[in-house]
Image (tube, grey):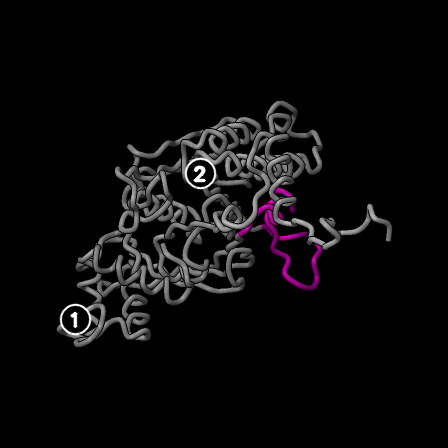
Amino acid sequence: MTDEQQPFSTTDGDPQPFNTTGAQQAFIASVNKQYKSNIASSGDGVRALDIPRFSSGILSLDLALGGGWPFSRIALLAGEESTGKTLIALRAASSLKDYCKVCHLHSTRCQCETFTPCTTLFVDIEGTFDPTWATLNGYDLDANTHVRPDYAEQAIDIIDAAIESGTFDLVIVDSLAALTPTKEIEDSAESNQVGLAARLLNKAFRKWVSSLSRVSNKGGAKPPALLCLNQLREKVGVMFGDPRTTPGGRGQLFAASVIVWTKAVKYADDPDKLTAIVELGGVTKKNKTHVPKLTYECKLALKDFGEVCAGHINNEDLLVKKGQQYALIGKDNTDFFFPDLRVGHMRARLREDYDLSTKLWQQIVQLECSVDV
């Protein structure tokens, strides 16, 4: 090895180790200066990339996701028709208003001088948005923005602009299967366009991933969560294995950090023998932010009956179950005091006391997923 190849410098004959830290910092500074962005980092700069989350509004789904939906990532929610995809998206938007736009922390943990609630952009490609049902699920029509694009290219550019602007903290795309390229609209219905929508969507996801990365590296506005809804179709001629697939190409599967598949719902009757309760559920098919292949289940009220209002999701049963499992609930020496440990009493109190249920919810998620939401 020649002198030029020696990894040591000599002073007065004593070998000195090469300054690795200084070389790394010089490289980081050079790269960031050249590209005018904070794309290179180490130490605390890398630790700052830890993924913040916000609650989905459904406790079982929060536990399956690893604490909630991740900010700055793409999540794909797919399933058959009427399996609760739009409902889950509306619940996410409803929960998001309790998080600070500046720090992306829950209002109970926010340290900012002024709390500014997060906002949502709802891109209604299907044209099936129901304001009444959205309001029942806690969606704020005044605080959030609704967009109804005419064609796929317009929707893609609007979503990209929303990401780049930093105005919104959640962008809901409902749905990818309804994106229609202009060529399909302009050409005759007899024209054959093989894979046109899939090629367009693959390009769209590459743009969105790049935009999310650029916003993250700017160091100012925080990138939003992108929640894309899609349908499940069946492949033709599949004899073995699962024939179900998502329309729009495979690019969405690679770009998404989280993929949730919803399952068929079950309906239940209330005491008046009228369909009042629907049981929703699904599985995390992919999760690069937590353990994948976890399931969730919840019950949704479709109509008012008793003390339960239409649109209410029963999180209380799981709160009580997990609270007792982790010894958070009890009569003595517990974090949450209940004079009466009857399940019905605890469930009613948690339903009525939002602050109490929120604190219990946060502690359960912290214990089970090791994250703060």
Which residue corresponds to mark 1? 338
> Which of the 4 quarters of the picture holds residue 287?
bottom right
In the foreground, 246 or 286: 286
- How far across and how far down the image is residue 99, in percent? 33, 45
Please tell me how crowded label 2 is: few (under 14), some (14-19), or many (20+) other residues with Cα within 10 Å: many
Q: Residue at x 59, y 49 (%)?
A: 246
Does the magenta stretch mainly form a helix, a strand or a loop?
loop
Which label number is shown at residue 118? Answer: none
Residue type marked 2: Lys
In-image side of 215 versus 67 (left or right): right
Q: Residue at x 62, y 38 (%)?
A: 206
Magenta span of residues = 233-257
- How far across and how far down the image is residue 331, in percent? 17, 76
Quarter of the picture holding the C terminus? bottom left
Which label number is shown at residue 222? Answer: 2
Q: Residue at x 42, y 30 (%)?
A: 147
